[in-house]
């Protein structure tokens, strides 16, 4: 490979900016260059870590001293059929690339994360879910075929019927480099959603709202105030949304220019400055106040009302505030998301929040979603709910925070719940083993031996969870 294409040493982290590792960055522009990275790694005795846009929160796409293969330069759209909605593209294309390319033809990615910046490769390696998970499943369920390059330099095209397909999707970069993806997009009539906002007063009302809308809404999501206690515990703001259709829709809502997020908030305040204000509030007192104010504002202004919102504004709310993660500096933050069967979700989440309040380590943001199970190898979803929470990290209280997460894990596991590797920073190997079960791990090792016999593909996540590393014969470390 032409070394001038960008190998350099850089300090990398996940989105939470808590753990870092130095790696040698390679940014291949073609399949041949991908194959070459493996050649060089083998020659130099290095591991390879795959990286998309670095939007996973923890140690999923870093590994000390590794050759880090960043897929972002392979981002071309190879073909687009505006009749069938089938798009074929290099896997470094982002969710943003997809919607910008297709929306004016009346199509939208079937599943999107809360940010538009992930690459398709990274999104499929984690098998992301959206606010429509309960209706349409994960992103992997909409893939028609994909192509990978294995660490031995083989190029494989995988169809959904291929036994490797459900392992590559969800397999957090352990089975090869996803280099091309063919995806079925979702047909739209309008670029807007009809959105209902309701302010549940407590946990009971939260879950009643999800149950009321789960058979007919296209999207559902709810914010939870993790500081609220007693009869107000679980209060927040629920949103259900529906694709607009019918006679009266405005087709101009499909224009890219109508979707773009504004540069100013309320027309006057540059959004690039917002994280600096957030940083001032990024402590327990400030966040208690902000959560309270959000709750009051929701109750006074929006409760029970419908409004129209662009798909981009509804889907990628977090992209409104660029660099918001910097508010958590210097020590960063972690996200904790657990998935709990519907019968136990209310109890588990309310216990999790009580534990946080007892330790005075409340999450500054809580987001509740409805899910459905899927059959990918490292599936995280269940027929139930997830609560995602952001915890500020401070060096002084890290041990306490880790202990809190472990106590929360115990409750989740006892309820038959699951976890999501894209968000994880604190799972213990035994937690991981328990929710996945021995048969999943055995299948992982079987496929890993087949596809990556020298165990070249590694990440800091897999070294934190050693159950993923044994019992290979040849460790390439
Ligand atoms: C603000 C925010 C909101 C989010 N909202 C959601 C959400 O709503 N739902 C959700 O499911 N997730 C959500 N996420 C998580 C995010 O969608 C996932 O972590 C996703 O995997 C990030 O993709 P990436 O391109 O940044 O990949 P990275 O984070 O860089 O890597 C992710 C994984 O993919 C592997 N990988 C990278 N490239 C390849 C490749 N070419 N082939 C094979 N494996 C590869 C990596 O090794 C790693 O294991 C959110 C993240 C943020 C920061």
Image: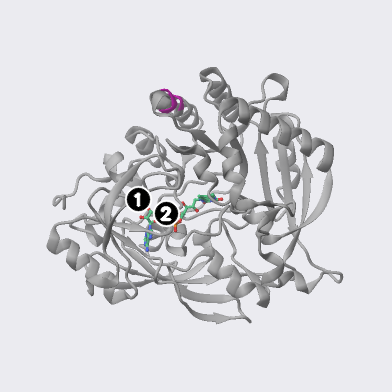
329 with respect to 262 (left or right): left
Q: Which mark is residue 202?
A: none
Q: Splitting the image into four quadrants, where does ligand 1 fall?
A: bottom left
Q: Is residue 3 above or below residue 216?
A: below
Please tell me whether mark 1 sits on a helix, a strand or a loop. Answer: strand
For the view shown, which residue lies furthest in the right direction?
A: 248
Q: Could you say where residue 302 lies in the image, as x and y percent from the top left?
A: 82, 43
* Relative image position of residue 58 (x, y in whole percent): 40, 44
Q: What residue lies at 69% left-to-right and 70% top-to-bottom?
A: 257
Q: Residue at x 60, y 36 (%)?
A: 366
Q: Quadrant of the N terminus?
A: bottom left
Q: Is mark 2 within 8 Å of ligand 1?
A: yes
Mark 2 or 1 closer to N-term? 1
- The residue segment tinted magenta is 400-404
Q: Which residue is mark 1?
A: 12
Q: Is residue 475 visible?
A: yes
For label 1, the crowd category at 10 Å Cα-Cα, with few meaning under 14, some 14 to 19 and many 20 or more, is many
Q: Nearer the viewer, residue 370 or 91?
A: 91
Q: Which residue is mark 2?
A: 54
Q: Horizontally, is 51 left or right of 278 in the view?
A: left
C-alpha span from label 2 to label 1: 8 Å
């Amino acid at each position: 490979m032409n070394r001038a294409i960008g190998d350099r040493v850089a300090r990398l982290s996940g989105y939470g900016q808590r753990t870092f590792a130095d790696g040698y960055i390679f940014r291949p522009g073609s399949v041949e260059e991908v194959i070459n990275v493996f050649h060089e790694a083998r020659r130099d005795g290095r591991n390879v870590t795959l990286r998309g846009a670095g939007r996973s929160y923890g140690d999923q796409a870093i590994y000390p001293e590794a050759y880090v293969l960043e897929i972002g330069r392979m981002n071309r759209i190879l073909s687009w059929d505006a009749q069938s909605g089938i798009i074929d593209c290099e896997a470094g294309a982002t969710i943003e690339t997809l919607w910008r390319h297709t929306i004016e033809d009346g199509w939208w990615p079937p599943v999107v994360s809360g940010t538009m910046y992930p690459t398709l490769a990274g999104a499929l390696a984690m098998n992301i879910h959206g606010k429509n998970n309960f209706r349409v499943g994960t992103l992997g369920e909409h893939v028609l075929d994909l192509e990978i390059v294995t660490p031995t330099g083989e190029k494989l095209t995988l169809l959904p019927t291929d036994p490797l397909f459900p392992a590559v999707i969800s397999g957090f970069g352990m089975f090869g480099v996803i280099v091309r993806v063919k995806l079925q997009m979702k047909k739209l009539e309008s670029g807007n959603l009809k959105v209902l906002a309701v302010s549940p007063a407590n946990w009971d009302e939260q879950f009643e709202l999800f149950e009321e809308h789960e058979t007919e809404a296209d999207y559902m999501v709810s914010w939870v105030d993790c500081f609220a206690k007693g009869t107000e515990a679980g209060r927040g703001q629920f949103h259900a949304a529906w694709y607009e259709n019918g006679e009266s829709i405005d087709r101009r809502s499909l224009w890219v220019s109508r979707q773009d997020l504004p540069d100013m908030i309320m027309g006057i305040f540059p959004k690039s400055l917002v994280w600096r204000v957030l940083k001032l509030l990024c402590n327990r007192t400030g966040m208690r106040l902000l959560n309270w104010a959000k709750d009051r504002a929701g109750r006074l202004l929006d409760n029970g009302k419908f409004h129209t919102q662009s798909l981009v504004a509804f889907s990628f709310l977090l992209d409104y505030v660029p660099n918001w993660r910097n508010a958590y500096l210097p020590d960063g933050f972690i996200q904790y998301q657990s998935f709990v069967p519907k019968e136990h979700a209310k109890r588990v989440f309310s216990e999790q929040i009580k534990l946080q309040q007892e330790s005075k380590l409340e999450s500054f943001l809580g987001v509740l979603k409805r899910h459905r199970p899927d059959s990918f190898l490292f599936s995280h979803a269940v027929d139930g709910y997830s609560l995602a929470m952001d915890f500020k990290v401070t060096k002084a209280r890290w041990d306490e925070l880790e202990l809190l997460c472990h106590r929360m894990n115990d409750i989740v596991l006892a309820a038959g719940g699951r976890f999501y590797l894209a968000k994880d920073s604190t799972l213990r190997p035994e937690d991981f083993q328990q929710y996945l079960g021995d048969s999943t791990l055995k299948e992982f090792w079987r496929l890993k031996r087949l596809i990556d016999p020298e165990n070249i593909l590694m990440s800091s996540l897999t070294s934190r969870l050693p159950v993923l590393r044994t019992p290979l014969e040849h460790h390439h470390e």
